[in-house]
Amino acid sequence: MRHDEPVGPKSPLYLQLRELIRSKIENGEYLPGTAIPSVGALAETYGIHRLSVRSAISALIGEGLLQSVQGKGIFVVGEKLAQDLGTVGGFEQTLKEGAQRSETRLLMKAARPAGSLYAGYLGCAPEDILYYVKRLCLLDGEPLSLEEAYVPRDLVPNLPNVDLNVFSLHQVYAFYGIRLVRGEQSLSISRLDSAEARLLDVDAHRGVLTLQCVNYDAQGRAIECTRSHIRGDKCELNVHFQREH
């Protein structure tokens, strides 16, 4: 459906509501990554039939401004930045790109000071606030990896209001026009504590693959530091290289 057709007081109600929702997205009242009011709430607020509300929402979903998630609601996607991340990103991002049967479950989302360790990784002051996100990645319903991410709060200030069971961190970055172009990775073997071992369904006395990555944007800013604890019995990590002439 075209969204540039003229809309006025005599236009169909669904068109008027469509433009009202669009304006709330554009002026920041409905922020990317957050849910808009339900169909019933919109129908009651504006005194129109639910069918008209659904038609307005369907049109905006078709334009890519909204996204329907079964059992959760209708979420704002906003103007997305086209990205070609290649292999830049954490293990969870690679999993999303390569497997349609994957899913993630949010375990924790909190704010914390960077401290000296993550200040060094992210080029910020130790007292600066980071968002810490912890998620469990699954493939075919079985746990595959634990993903931890540390992101400077000033880069994605709306993150606490974003449902990270619906949107990936890379989608959130796109909301803010952030494009990751370079990453520095290191691979090690580590042991999990008993609680994390249970989440991954592994023996706490056996090591897991740990992939740490710091990702940067085109301006050289460190955007995130991720650490992925990966079950070695469920996947393999490949490295591709080419000799420069």
Image (cartoon, helix red, strand yellow):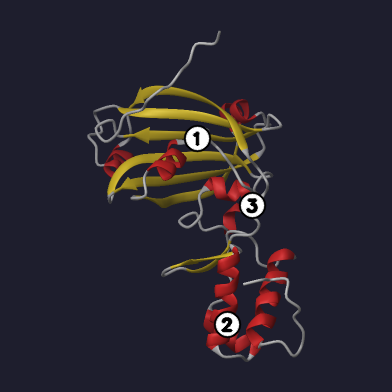
Label at residue 234: none
Cα gap from disc 1 to disc 3, whole angstroms: 19 Å
Q: Is residue 137 visible?
A: yes
Snapshot quadrant of residue 8: bottom right
Label at residue 175: 3
Total numbered circles: 3
Q: Amino acid at mark 2?
A: Val
| Residue 86 percent location from the top left of the image | 52, 34
Residue on which disc 1 sits: 226
Q: Viewer-nearest of labels 1 and 3? A: 3
Label 2 environment density (alpha carbons within 10 Å; few <14, some 14–19, many ≥20): many
- The relative height of residue 68 versus residue 218 in the rendered view (above or below) is below
Q: Give the mark, 3 or 2, whose residue is nearer the N terminus.
A: 2
| Residue 69 percent location from the top left of the image | 46, 66
Q: Amino acid at mark 3?
A: Phe
Horizontal relation, residue 201 to residue 112: left or right: left
Q: Give the mark, 2 or 1, whose residue is nearer the N terminus.
A: 2
| Residue 140 percent location from the top left of the image | 28, 49
Residue on which disc 2 sits: 53
- The relative height of residue 42 versus residue 99 in the rendered view (above or below) is below
Q: Amino acid at mark 1?
A: Thr
